């Protein structure tokens, strides 16, 4: 129950048993083309898709090095570890990150973005970490940010590493120029594949202004796909088979049903954990359906608590980052999450709390189960 990597269905794992093939063969071209087309459906886009053999961080870095040049201004909301990393990356690459700060667990007011564009007429891009993994915080006005960037002539970039495939993100409808995600989160595949969607406008810019880099140079990926349906470098072939199978499972379920399932499971987690006396870290209007971040109660030692969950109940959850270390714990509620995962996790948390001498409400599991009835 980590915020990633998440549980991987057996049929996805078994897909990696396929023979390793020549990545310059017709077999590979068929595989790659099918993955790109399925990824477009999941992203809800007609834009170009690049599949990078990297972690999500590699895809995020590609979104910066292919777009940002020295002195370019980029607006970005900063409210946690990963949005801070992205802002720092923009600065280190020579850009100028205009940070719109908010306390962890909150999002800045939308009008702060309007103000930033009014004060800076030469903003090139608006970056946003859609789901801040470190705090369980989701931006609930991404559509408005896309409209704003489009109206101002800026590029809109969505870091959707820990949310795409589990919550709403229609790339074309929301005017997202570059959208990045990773296989090991809500898409429920093994880590190592990071898809990137690129709009026609952003693609044209990248082709005319290629970055001084090799592996993350997206112009090379466009060229190889258009000319050969290939990648410029050797991809992680077994992971491609797994990723294709995971995409098939997403499409079989349907995005609307998948998003609904994630929302119901998140509601059950929040209700059940609240019944145990635990409070969510994120503010109500910013709470994630992918990562449930919860404040510790007095007497709950982070190391002991998570150690008990792991050793006694075989349930893995994550602790807090940086200043939040020892203050919160985080439960991943994404991918193949369902009734079993929610109920086992909440009952295990209740048992671990009791073992630590923290009194709990015995009705907490019933509260969660009531929410899960909506799954049918």
Image: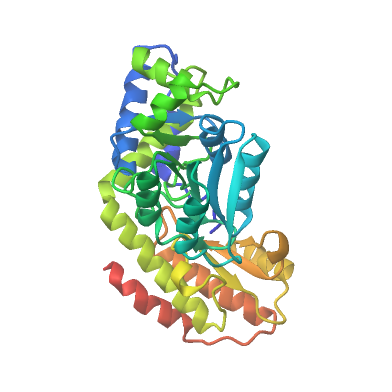
Q: Position of residue 321 (x, y in %)?
A: 67, 59
Q: Position of residue 56 (x, y in %)?
A: 54, 41
Please state if 305 lies on the left or on the right of 145 as rendered: right
Please state if 221 lies on the left or on the right of 150 as rendered: right
Q: Position of residue 31 (x, y in %)?
A: 35, 24
The reply to whether residue 38 is visible in this rendering is yes
Quarter of the image that includes the C terminus:
bottom left
Is residue 268 shown above or below 224? below
> Residue 166, located in which quarter of the rendered image?
bottom left
The reply to whether residue 4 is visible in this rendering is no
**256 or 81: nearer the viewer:** 81
Is residue 48 shown above or below 73? above
**92 or 324: nearer the viewer:** 92
Q: How many callouts does the rendering have?
A: 0
Q: Position of residue 65 (x, y in %)?
A: 57, 31
> Residue 327, located in which quarter of the rendered image?
bottom right
Residue found 61% across the figure and 58% down from its top: 80
Rendered image coloring scheme = rainbow
């Amino acid at each position: 129950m980590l915020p990633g990597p998440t549980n991987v269905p057996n049929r996805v794992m078994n897909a990696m048993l396929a023979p390793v093939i020549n990545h310059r063969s017709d077999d590979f071209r068929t595989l790659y083309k099918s993955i790109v087309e399925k990824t477009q459906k999941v992203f809800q886009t007609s834009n170009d898709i690049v599949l990078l053999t990297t972690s999500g961080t590699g895809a995020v870095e590609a979104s910066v090095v292919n777009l940002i040049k020295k002195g370019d201004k980029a607006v970005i909301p900063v409210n946690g570890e990963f949005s801070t990393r992205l802002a720092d990356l923009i600065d280190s690459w020579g850009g100028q990150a205009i940070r719109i700060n908010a306390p962890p667990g909150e999002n800045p007011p939308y009008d702060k973005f309007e103000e930033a564009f009014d004060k800076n007429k030469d903003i090139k891009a608006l970056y946003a970490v859609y789901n801040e993994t470190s705090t369980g915080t989701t931006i609930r006005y991404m559509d408005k940010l896309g409209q704003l960037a489009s109206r101002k002539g800026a590029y809109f970039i969505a870091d959707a590493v820990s949310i795409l495939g589990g919550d709403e993100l229609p790339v074309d409808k929301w005017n997202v120029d570059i959208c990045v995600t990773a296989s090991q989160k809500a898409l429920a595949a093994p880590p190592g594949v990071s898809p990137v969607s690129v709009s026609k406008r952003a693609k044209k810019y990248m082709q005319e202004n290629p970055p001084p880099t090799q592996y993350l140079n997206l112009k090379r990926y466009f060229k190889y796909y258009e000319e050969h349906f290939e990648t410029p470098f050797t991809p992680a072939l077994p992971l491609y088979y797994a990723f294709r199978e995971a995409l098939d499972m997403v499409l079989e379920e349907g995005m609307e049903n998948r998003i609904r399932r994630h929302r119901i499971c998140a509601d059950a987690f929040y209700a059940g954990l609240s019944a145990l006396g635990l409070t969510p870290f994120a503010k109500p209007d910013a709470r994630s359906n992918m990562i449930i971040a919860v404040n510790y109660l007095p007497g709950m030692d982070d190391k002991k608590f998570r150690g008990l969950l792991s050793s006694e109940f075989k349930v893995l959850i994550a602790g807090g980052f940086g200043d939040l270390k020892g203050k919160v714990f985080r439960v991943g509620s994404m991918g193949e999450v369902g009734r079993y995962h929610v109920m086992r996790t909440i009952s295990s948390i209740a048992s671990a709390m009791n073992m630590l001498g923290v009194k709990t409400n015995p009705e907490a599991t019933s509260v969660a189960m009531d929410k899960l009835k909506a799954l049918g």
